[in-house]
Image (spheres, rainbow, N blue to C red):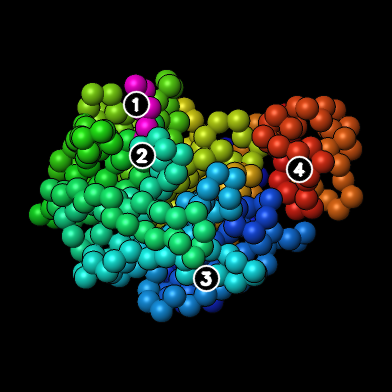
Amino acid sequence: MPLVTAEKVFSLPGLNGMVQVDWGALTGARENLVAAAGPIVYLFTASNTGYVLSSRADVGTQVLSLAAGLPISNGAVDNIVLGMEDRVALYGSRQGALVRLAETQPEPGARFADLALADLDGDGREEIIAAPEGMASLFFYRLFGQRDADLRLELLAIRLLPGTAQKVVTFRRKGNATPVVAVAYRRNGHSGLLTLIFTERGFAEGPALADLPALVTSLTAGDLRTGPEEELAWGGSDGFLRILESDGSLTPVFTSDNLGSGIPALTAGRLAGESTVTLVAGTPEGYIFGYRSPVENSAPDWAVRAGSPVNDLAVSGEGLLGLGTADGGVQVWVLSGPNGLIHTVRPGETLFTIAGRYGTTVQAIVDANMIADPAMIFPGQILRIP
C-alpha cells in the first residue's frame, strides 16, 4: 500500500466520553477545532506549536452531535450547533467564552444524534437538519434574528421517515440549485436511505434505497468519482465502505475491502497538499484509511494508525484532519500523499520567501490555498505548494 506523510500535530487525551469534532472560524482568521465529549464543549485555537484550549462550556446534558457554521449574517463568525437529548442549541464564542445564543423547543425522546447545515432555500442563510435517533422523522430548523439578544431557533418543517433517523448529510446534484438532503434511517433491523429536495411546496422525495446490506454507521458526501455531481458514501456495521451515485436513482458504484469491525467515522475533503478530494474512514481498531478521488480501487490508498478507536472525523479548510476518539481523545493530523507538497509557516516567513524556497510564485500559492489577503499568513498555517 502506498505510504502517506502523516504527522500528528496535536493530541489531547482524557476528555469525558466519546468525542465529536468539527472545524469552524469562530475566533479569528484561522479555523478553530471544536470538540464535544459528555456535556462539555471545547474550543481550540491554532498556535505556533499546534492547538491550545481557548475556552470550554458545560452545557448541562450530553452532547450527541455537533456542527460548526450557521453565521448570523454574511461575513460573520461561525457558531456551534449542538444536538442534545431533547433539543438543538446554538453556542457562540463571545469575549473569550462559549455562550448559549438560542435553543429549540424541547422534543422529548428525540436524541438528536446527527446534524447537517446547509442553505436549503437559497436565501443565503443556513438551515439546521437534525436527525433524532429516537424518532421516525427529520427536523428542520431556521435561525431568526440579526443580534445575539434577538436570536431564536424555530421549527421550519418535520419530515416523517420510514424508520428511526440515523445519519444525515447534504450533497449537490446536477440540475439542483440547492443542496439535496440524504438521510439514513433504521427499520426492522435494516437501514435505508432516502433523499429530499426543498421546493416551494415543501420537501419532495428523491431517489431512495431500502434494505441496505448493513446498518449505516457513518454518512458523508463529496466529489468522489468522475463527473460533475457529488456522490454519497456510507460506512457500514459490517466494516465496508460504499459509494452511491444519485441521478434518477441511488446507484451503488463502489464497495471497499473490509476495513475492520465497523466504520463509525467518515468524512471527505481536500487534505493538505492535495488537489482532489480524499475520502477518509475511521475504525474502532484505531485506523484511518484514505481513498483519493476518483475512488475506484477497493483497497485504500493509504492507512495510518491513530492509536485509539476512532469516533468522528472532520477535514478543515486548511486540509487538516480533526479526529475524535471513542475513549476521550482529540487529535489533529497533517496527512499528505506522494503527490502533495505542504509547508508549515514559520515565524517571520512571508509568501515571497516561501515561494522562493520552492521555486514557485506568490500568486500560485495564493491560488492553491484560496488566500484572501497575501499579507495575512500565520505561523503554524499549512500551505499547499503547487
Residue at the left extreme of this rendering: 188
Q: Earlier in the sequence, mark 4 or mark 3?
A: 3
> Which secondary structure type mostly characterizes the magenta part of the structure?
loop
Q: Amino acid at mark 1?
A: Asn
The numbered dot on residue 176 is 1
Mark 2 or 4, closer to the camera: 2
The numbered dot on residue 310 is none
Which residue is labeled 4 in the image? Answer: 343
Q: Is residue 89 left or right of residue 347?
A: left
Mark 4 or 3, closer to the camera: 3
Residue 235 visible at all:
no
Which residue is labeled 2 in the image? Answer: 120
Q: Quick one: 78 or 249, which is closer to the camera? A: 78
Q: Is residue 336 left or right of residue 172?
A: right
Q: Earlier in the sequence, mark 3 or mark 1?
A: 3
- Looking at the image, do the residues carrying marks 4 and 3 touch, with CB atoms under 8 Å apart? no
Mark 3 or 1, closer to the camera: 3
The image position of residue 262, as x and y in percent, is: 33, 54
Please tell me whether mark 1 sits on a helix, a strand or a loop: loop
Q: Earlier in the sequence, mark 1 or mark 4?
A: 1
Which residue is labeled 3 in the image? Answer: 99
- Label 2 and label 4: CA atoms lie apart by 37 Å
Residue at screen point 83% across, 38% down: 351
Residue 124 visible at all:
yes
Crowding at mark 4 (Cα within 10 Å: few <14, some 14-19, many 20+): some
The image position of residue 349, as x and y in percent, is: 87, 45
Q: Earlier in the sequence, mark 2 or mark 3?
A: 3
- Label 2 and label 3: CA atoms lie apart by 27 Å
Q: Amino acid at mark 4?
A: His
